Image: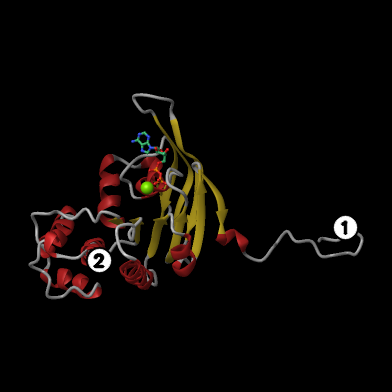
């Protein structure tokens, strides 16, 4: 179980007024499933995702993973959380350009303090259907293939949570669909959180859609479950249109 409680984040740019990027965001995530965080540019999606993954810190609020709160985290705990619990996938892939595919995955394992196990790497690459591409450099791959490497790099760490920031933003529609199909398959066994401005993708692939506007949650499809508060019609009330 993974939860965010009361996350607030304000940026203080050198020029201009402070930006309240997150104004108190709380979300309970399940163990698995594909959750979309949907919102316009500037709504705070990337800020939220970075905080969920320990890449940035909230000014207020906490994360709770399996009963452990980040409130009591040391820097080492945050390092471990980033390295072991979450895998990141970015719009621009963020692969190391001078390293080949195998080496990009090896680095992720080494950052975990683990050996660059050849079988683990091969298995992650099989999972994203990239076997045989181990020796290619990122510039020898298509956008879709680069994103598959990024997903394999997240997977090789075997994290509980995969966080993806606009993972299809740089891809054509067909390739984007393929990437989301892959992430959706992974969400059987992992929590996959995808940030996107694309409502169509969110509705097609999301098990749950959380909408963010101006640093606040304005809608959560998981809140649309059977209307608990719907009162039985006693005939005396006003008729609803
Ligand atoms: P999104 O990913 O939804 O486009 P972001 O989380 O990137 O939104 O940004 C939310 C708001 O915070 C925006 O108004 C953005 O301009 C601002 N912002 C993001 N990063 C910084 C920063 N490092 N310094 C100042 N403002 C920032
Ligand atoms: Mg963003």
Q: How crowded is mark 1: few (under 14 residues within 10 Å), some or many (20 or more)?
A: few
Q: Please name the residue shown 73% across and 59% down the image.
A: 229
Relative image position of residue 196 (x, y in whole percent)? 41, 56
Q: Locate residue 126: give its quadrant.
A: bottom left
Label 2 close to label 1 by CB (< 8 Å): no
Q: Earlier in the sequence, mark 2 or mark 1?
A: 2
The answer to whether one can see residue 115 in this image is no
Quadrant in which residue 71 is drawn: top left
Q: In which quadrant of this rendering is ligand 1 seen?
A: top left
- Mark number for residue 158? none
Q: Name the residue under label 1.
A: 238
- For the residue pair 178 and 71, the one nearer the viewer reads as 178
Say which element carries label 2.
helix
Indicate left or right for 172 with 103 as reference: right
Q: Is residue 134 left or right of residue 82?
A: left
| Residue 57, percent from left and from top | 36, 39
- Mark 2 — residue? 144
Measured in 3D between alpha carbons, the distance from the residue under mark 2 to the one under mark 1, in whole angstroms, is: 55 Å
Q: In which quarter of the image is the C terminus?
A: bottom right
Q: In which quarter of the image is the N terminus?
A: bottom left
Residue 49 drawn above or below residue 106 = above
Q: Which residue shows up at 50% across the image and 45% down it?
A: 25
209 with respect to 143 (left or right): right
Q: Nearer the viewer, residue 187 or 12?
A: 12
Q: Position of residue 140 (x, y in %)?
A: 12, 64
Residue lying at the far right in this picture: please name it. 236
Q: Position of residue 151 (x, y in %)?
A: 26, 64
Q: What element carries label 1?
A: loop
């Amino acid at each position: 179980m993974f939860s965010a409680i009361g996350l607030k984040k304000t940026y203080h740019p050198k020029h201009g007024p402070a930006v309240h990027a997150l104004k108190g965001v709380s979300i309970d995530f399940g163990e698995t499933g594909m959750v979309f965080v949907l919102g316009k540019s500037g709504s705070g999606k990337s800020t939220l995702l970075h905080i969920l993954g320990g890449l940035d810190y909230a000014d207020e609020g906490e994360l709770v993973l399996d009963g452990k709160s980040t409130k009591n985290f040391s820097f080492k705990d945050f390092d471990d959380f980033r390295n072991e619990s979450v895998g990141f996938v970015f719009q621009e892939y963020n692969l190391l350009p001078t390293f080949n595919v195998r080496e990009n995955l090896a680095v992720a394992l080494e950052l975990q303090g683990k050996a660059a196990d050849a079988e683990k790497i091969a298995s992650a690459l099989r999972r994203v259907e990239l076997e045989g591409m181990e020796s290619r450099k990122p510039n020898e791959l298509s956008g879709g293939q680069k994103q598959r490497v990024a997903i394999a790099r997240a997977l090789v760490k075997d994290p509980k949570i995969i966080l993806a920031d606009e993972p299809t933003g740089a891809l054509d529609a067909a390739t984007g669909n393929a990437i989301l199909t892959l992430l959706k398959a992974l969400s059987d066994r992992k929590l996959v959180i995808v940030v996107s401005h694309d409502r169509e993708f969110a509705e097609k692939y999301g098990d749950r859609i959380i909408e963010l506007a101006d640093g606040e949650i304005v809608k959560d499809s998981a809140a649309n479950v059977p209307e608990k508060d719907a009162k039985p019609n006693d005939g005396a009330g006003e008729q609803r249109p």
